[in-house]
Amino acid sequence: MAAQCWNLMKNQKSKIPGRRLFIISCLLLLTIPYFTNAQYCSFVKAIGLNKSSLDNRIACSYEDEKVFFTTQSDWDKDAHVIKFFCCRINDMKMDSFTVIVPSDITIYDLPDISANDQFLILVDDDEMKIHVFTRSGNTYKYKNDLKLPEHIAITEIKALSNNLFLMYSIYNYDKAENLYNSNVCIYDALQDKIVHIIHPEMPCIAFSHLSMQNVAYTSSSVAVSDPCGYKIRLYDRDLSIKDSIEYTAQQWKNYPGNKFPYETNPAIIHPKLLIEKLQQSEDSVSRIERIFFINENQLLVSSKGPGNSRNTRRLDIWTKKHLTNSIEHYPIRYNDTDTLHLNSIPLLLNNNNNTFFADGIMIQVNEENLYPEENETLKHFTERKNIFYEKNDPQYSIAIYKIN
């Protein structure tokens, strides 16, 4: 029945004028293996964005049941115009608006974005500049650039409320740049100033050259995990420390003193060589790779290490500092003969960085709009994709999952 619902709905066209949107709106009540019977994740629906993901990066943010996004193809650098889109999660309807960027602002690469109903903020981490826009009718108008304190760099920004934004950067900067390696800030857009800032001491900061998402947030809390060791700091919205999680997981291994046995300063060691060494280190030490708040009270922690193959991760769910569920070897890649389930593939697959949790749902912005049919093997799905993509470019899509 689930597969029939998928097949019937996957080619339904949206009635939104001018956009071909493919909507899948069936509810499949199958569980992700790592959740208990009392809490599971079920596929709800997906929408194609009619935006090619081939050589076309996307920037997106989630706030108040809306996904805001833009891509490189929507950015006219010569005209200084960026087209943005807003997808409402409750009904999956799309709106668009155009933003004019002042001619004296030059952004060379697609910026990180954060948007809500009052503000739009663009983070140009190449130039280390933050551009603030305010709502004006059905678009946003440039307001000013945010002046950062000395020795601070910001690469990511997330909306916490209408006027408060979480801003952060955790990276192994060249010491000659004289920048803090860890920066976590709260920016008040109404006051146009950073109202709180911390620089947590972090071991093994060089792991930031690999895939890592070690900041999670809700409207009232911020969590920051160390790049190595199993330690997570929990802060309130003022960035005052509330608590911490320190844990020794089964088969967990650290470097002595959480210090690398080799040089990690990118001014001394070539970045390519450093990355190769870091990748080799993952075969002998453990590290937290990604953290998410599932809701206000539950934190999901994904880690990897010697106890995991390259195709698995350890997943832990913490509920107010109590470990409530774990799985040692959660698969993130599959063999040709494995059967795929819509509910068992979304989380962590392909290191998707555009994953958001809110109000009992998980939202993923994916680089493909072709999904497996229920109980389809990976081999069959791959063959079907190859045929499909001979004539079609892969396109971005948004998938919604419900967590009960």
Image: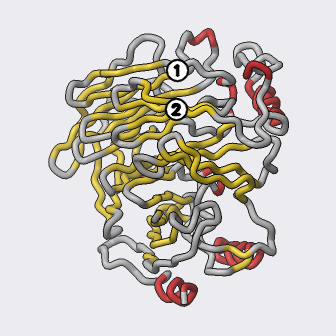
Of 65 and 121, the residue lying toward us? 65
Judge from the rendering whether residue 113 lies leftward or rightward of residue 4; answer left or right.
left
* Horizontal and vertical percent position of residue 204: 69, 24
Q: Which mark is residue 200?
A: 1
Q: Quadrant of residue 344?
A: bottom right
Provide the residue designation for mark 2.
224
Taking the spot 62% from the left edge, 80% from the top edge, the residue there is 374
Which of the two labelled residues, at mark 1 and mark 2, occupies the earlier sequence position? 1
C-beta proximity under 8 Å, tags 1 and 2: yes
Give the vertical position of 171 relative to 60 (above or below).
above
Of 160 and 38, the residue lying toward us? 38
Q: Residues within 10 Å of mark 2 (few under 14, many from 20)?
A: many
Q: Quadrant of residue 230?
A: top right
The CA span between labels 1 and 2 is: 9 Å
**Badge 1 amino acid:** Pro
Q: Which mark is residue 271?
A: none
Taking the spot 47% from the left edge, 51% from the top edge, the residue there is 294
Q: How is the model colour-coded?
A: secondary structure
Judge from the rendering whether residue 48 lies leftward or rightward of residue 210; answer left or right.
left
